[in-house]
Amino acid sequence: MPFNDIPVFKALAQRLTTLSFRQGLLARNLANIQTPHQKAIDIDPKALSGSSQGFKHIIELKKTNAKHISSQNQTSSNGLKITTSKDKDQVTIQGNNIALDDQLQKVEETRLAHQVATMLYRKNHDLIRTALQVKG
C-alpha cells in the first residue's frame, strides 16, 4: 500500500505542497521588493490553517509595455487561492507594498511549519516501520 493512500500521509503531503507553494510566492515578493508598483502576494490564510479545500486562482502578470514578454497564466499546482495585499499603510516610494521584515517573518513561519510537517511525516513513517517489524 502506497503511503499516499494513508490519510495522515496524504494530509501531510498536501500540507508540504501548500507550504512549498507559499515559499515560492514569498520568494517572488522578495525578488520584487524594489520593483515599482508591485503588490505583495500570499496564499489564502484559510489554506494555511487547513480549514479550506483550496481555491483556483490564476496569477496575471501585468504587461506595461508592448515589448514585454507576453504573460502566461500560471495556476497553483494544488488550486490554492492567492491573495494580493492591499495594505495602504506600507506603500514605499516606488509604490509597492512589499515590506522586507513582513516577508522575512512569513518565510520563517513557513520554514518552521514545513519543519513540523516533515517531522510528523518522518515520525509516522517510523511508527509504521516499527509496527511492520513487530508484526513480522
Image (cartoon, rainbow, N blue to C red):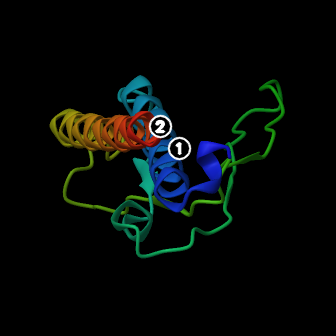
Q: Amino acid at mark 2?
A: Ser
Find residue 17 and name its label.
Answer: 1
The residue depicted at 47 percent of the width and 37 percent of the height is: 20
Answer with left or right where residue 46 lies relative to residue 93. right
Find residue 38 and name its label.
Answer: none
Secondary structure beneath label 1: helix
| Residue in front for this viewpoint, 53 or 2 | 2
Q: Residues within 10 Å of mark 1 (few under 14, many from 20)?
A: some
Q: Image quarter for residue 64?
A: top right
Q: Is residue 37 visible?
A: no
Vertical placement of 77 versus 125: above or below? Answer: below
Answer with left or right where residue 130 lies relative to residue 99. right
The residue depicted at 32 percent of the width and 47 percent of the height is: 97
Q: Residue furthest front?
A: 136
Q: Position of residue 43 (x, y in %)?
A: 46, 56
Find residue 20 and name its label.
Answer: 2
The residue depicted at 27 percent of the width and 34 percent of the height is: 115
Q: How many angstroms separate mark 1 from mark 2 (CA)?
A: 5 Å
Secondary structure beneath label 2: helix
Q: Amino acid at mark 1?
A: Thr
The residue depicted at 36 percent of the width and 36 percent of the height is: 130
Q: Position of residue 77 (x, y in %)?
A: 68, 47
Q: Position of residue 132 (x, y in %)?
A: 47, 39
Answer with left or right where residue 54 lies relative to residue 109. right
Q: Are marks 1 and 2 in contact (CB under 8 Å)?
A: yes
| Residue in front for this viewpoint, 31 or 88 | 31
| Residue in front for this viewpoint, 49 or 24 | 49
